[in-house]
Amino acid sequence: RERNAAMAPPPPARKYGAPLFFCSFAPKSSSDAAEVVLGGGGGASSTGVANRLLLVRVEDNAGVKGGPHKERLESDPASELHTGSVTAVGGTLVPTKDYFIAVLSGGDGLVKYRLKSGEGDKKEFQKIDVADREKLKSFKQAEIKVATSDSTGTHVAVGYSSGKIVVYETGTFREVKSFDPAKHSEVLPEKGGVMNLCYTPCDGKLVVVRDNGTAFVWDHAAKKKTEKKESKKKSEEVAKVPGDGGMYRGCCSFEGGDGSSLFCLGVNGKDRRSKVSMWCVGGRGTGARRLVSRHAHNSAITALAGCSGAEQGRGRLVATACSEGDICIYSADHKMAVLHRVSNAHMIFVTNLAFSPDGRRLVSCSADAGARITNITKTGRQVGMEHNIFLALVALLLALLLSAV
């Protein structure tokens, strides 16, 4: 029954009236009472399309017994906040905190929001003011492209259209360290804005994907060298990821278990096909090494997300989505074996993906104003067992054919 449910066409995504660019599971969202935050809109007020943040609950999908479509989002938001003439184009959930950080285009740049109980226990979005007004002014003057929190919620890394990266304290937005691409021109081309960022969980390095299709790992804890030493040796702060036959798009990272950092990248090839690859970066200055690569979609990857999935034996998970609206979920512990592939999950390109902390659900949103839940009902171990059974059956069939000759 579950296999038939997985093969059936997906039910339509819920529509919320405006293009969506940001999705995340809500802070403190539990497995039994899951809620997601959606953000998007039409940009400038002259478009007539409202810019909003939405809180939407997850509900059972009536009539679906199991498989990846057993749950869906409710049609009516539980709460909403109009953001005026600015649009939420990204953001990050902050682990261990009761708030999330939204990236707003054309406005404050970075804004913290928490969900508080209002009248009748209805949850409402509450903006958390930042005391440093000069910091807010600097956010407004620069074009922020992406933000990501570390695993402890202590720091947030922010990528700018200029290629600059700044690490801030999450609570105060005090600047801790910054990355200037001009100072690493011997390793990286200077031009290229930051498109995607993720922290490695075990050593706090940053995996960076730029809009020119290149990728690198920044070890912002590395000690600065003297000018004399820098002239003799490339900076140990930056490990450039070798080319992989296309342009990188999207990143996520995991703990390797042996002190190394593992991360995944999407790769969009020149033939419009895409793949997903896993990489390892070891000690300082050792560079990145590709471990595995597999086909993802017949069109370009537009979003990528990852999850440690430690609970319930789910292991490390990766999800990609493409320009044609398809979604694919992989097991990073089993050489990127496919767990679920959802064709036509959205009508057009997917803008964002996010796993629930327990790895049981994936939320996706699209420029078609739609958002949906995909349930992860398979594990990498199950797929591995199915593969082994298939190989055993093939071996048995060959043995029978040979014995009949």
Image: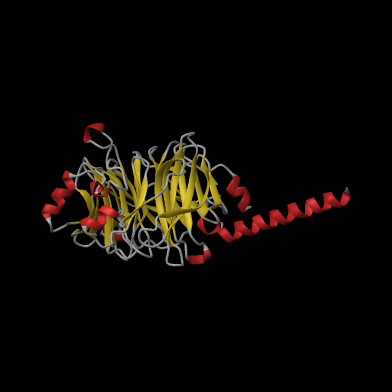
Q: Residue at x 44, y 37 (%)?
A: 323
Q: How is the image coloured?
A: secondary structure
Relative depth, front residue between 111 and 115: 111
Is residue 26 toward the left or the right of residue 376 in the image? left
Is residue 143 toward the left or the right of residue 330 in the image? left
Relative depth, front residue between 138 and 361: 138
Seen in the picture, residue 273 relative to 136 is either above or below; the reply is above
Relative depth, front residue between 327 and 292: 292
Q: Is residue 125 visible?
A: no
Seen in the picture, residue 274 relative to 79 is either above or below; the reply is above
Percent across and percent down for residue 196 are 34, 48
Residue lying at the far left in this picture: please name it.
Answer: 134
Q: Is residue 276 visible?
A: yes
Relative depth, front residue between 30 and 238: 238
Percent across and percent down for residue 294 are 53, 47
Residue lying at the far right in this picture: please name it.
Answer: 405
Percent across and percent down for residue 53 are 29, 48
Percent across and percent down for residue 132 are 12, 57
- Count of residue discs: 0
Is residue 100 toward the left or the right of residue 286 in the image? left
